[in-house]
Amino acid sequence: MPGRRRDGGFVTVEAAISLGALTAVLAMLMAGIGALSGHIRCLDAAREAARLTAAGQPGAAEAVVQTIAPHGAKLALRRSGDGITAEVTTDALAGFLPGIHLGGAAFAIAEPGTDPTDQPASAPSPATQSSHAPAIPPSDEEGGPT
């Protein structure tokens, strides 16, 4: 046919490039949603751990971190006066987003009549074990380890 250009194959190449770019964007979007979800789970676990530790139940705090936080999360508890800080960290997305470390921290005031430094009745699992020389090391302002 006279006057008709030969575009044979160009549309196919453009579609293939577009689909590849769309796939890459969707993969990054899914990884970002996974990171946001992991961060929220770490925050929730830290909040519950701080609340339970302030109530004098550090063993329950470690169990709740195993339940709520992403797999492999670690719990660190710090005491500052009557305050308890719980920090939950994980590298759960290392396979998808290398170098991204997720975490969350929460603060609670110890309830009257409780001793938040009590050792838990059962030993913590290695997945959430933090240094328990004292169960909750005092902060620097209390003359604790530096």
Image (cartoon, rainbow, N blue to C red):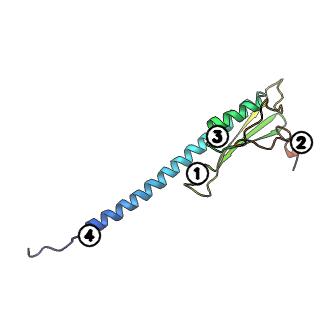
Q: Residue at x 62, y 36 (%)?
A: 68
Q: Which mark is residue 93?
A: 1
- Pointer 2 or 4: first along the chain: 4
Q: Which residue is mark 2?
A: 142
User: Given the current orientation, which residue lies at the most extreme right position?
Assistant: 143
Cβ–Cβ below 8 Å for labels 1 and 2? Answer: no
Residue, far top: 113
Q: Nearer the viewer, residue 62 or 85?
A: 62
For marks 1 and 3 on the same chain, the one whose residue lies earlier in the sequence: 3
**Secondary structure at numbered mark 3:** helix
Question: Viewer-nearest of labels 1 and 2?
Answer: 1
Instruction: Give how far apart the Cα atoms at labels 2 and 4 are.
Output: 72 Å
Marking on residue 10? 4
Name the front one of labels 1 and 4.
1
Disc on res. 43: 3
Query: Callout 4: 10 Å neighbours few (<14), some, many (20+)?
Result: few
Give the quadrant of the N terminus.
bottom left
